[in-house]
Image: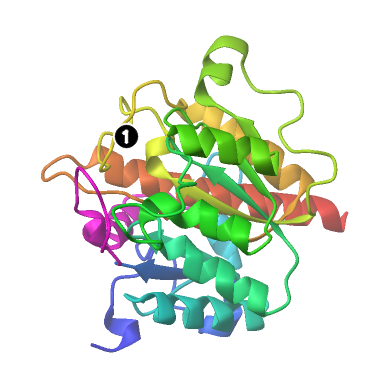
Amino acid sequence: MKAHDQPRFLDSETPDLPQNQCLFQVIPAPYEKTVSYGGGTVQGPAAIILASGQLEAYDGTSCPCEHGIHTMEPAATLEAIEAAVAKVSAMGKIPVMLGGEHTVTYGALKALQERGEEFGVIQFDAHADLRDTYEGDKFSHACVMHRALEMGLPLVQIGVRALSPPEVELRKKYAIHHHDADQFGRHGLPAQLLPADFPQKVYITFDVDGLDPSIMPATGTPEPGGLSWWQAMDCLTAITSSRTVIGFDVVELAPIANLHAPDFTAARLIYNLMGYITRAMAANKN
């Protein structure tokens, strides 16, 4: 199947523009090798793209799709993911990766770092993903942020509510800045979400289990007490208004048959983030 014959993100509202005319480059990454408890993330990218066809072009404030959205061919290995992100970055565009399990983030981070980008990582997640190995695998989805630390990437964690004792110690060792989910529930949005010295360029990785399972049940390990929709949107607004997003991903959606709401929620999350990014870009030009 040729790339232009494949379903596209928001194809119901957008023309099939040439790739070089699109700010956002959607990379489906149906990679699933190490999920635990519940599987199905390999179906996540297709479900998100299908659901995106039901989005409106107007997101409530603007039409982010006017900046162009191109959907690339699926990248189903870490090597293919790395190559796809490297290509998008070289074009000066923004990679938008649809997981797949959280391990896919490693391929994106590696590509951006090898291109010489200096950036920090902002992780939305129920889990810290800081284990050195999990079930004997250093590239488990539970280890992806440990690999990011080994790459020397600054990290901020948002929404975490499940950690192992070694992960707690690693947080202390690396002085990882974090706002765990209970802080939002009890105190609301922090006055300062990111450290003052956090890099200007950022990569956002959003594991959908960072959201509360009442609005996001379709994930392998749903953890109670997660972020509400508007808490997540407030965080993303704060991030995009103060930093430059050079790429982002939404991962760990495991679709549930005949339950469309989580798929649509993930698609709307992605489109809203596109909107926050484009409006921040416009504001910075003025």
Residue with the mark numbered 1: 216
Callout 1 amino acid: Met
Closer to the camera in the image, 131 or 98: 131
Give residue 32's position: percent from left, percent from top. Answer: 27, 63
Q: In the rendered structure, which segment of residues is drawn in magenta?
A: 31-58
Q: Seen in the image, is 89 located left or right of residue 267?
A: right
Residue 251 on the magenta segment: no
Give residue 37's position: percent from left, percent from top. Answer: 20, 43
Where residue 21 sits, quadrant-wise, is: bottom right
Crowd rating for badge 1 (residues with CA inside 10 Å; few <14, some 14–19, many 20+): many
Residue 33 on the magenta segment: yes
Q: Residue at x 21, y 48 (%)?
A: 255
Q: Is residue 79 visible?
A: yes
Q: Residue at x 75, y 66 (%)?
A: 118
Give residue 101's position: percent from left, percent from top. Answer: 34, 57
| Whether residue 180 is situated above or below residue 147 in the rendered picture | above
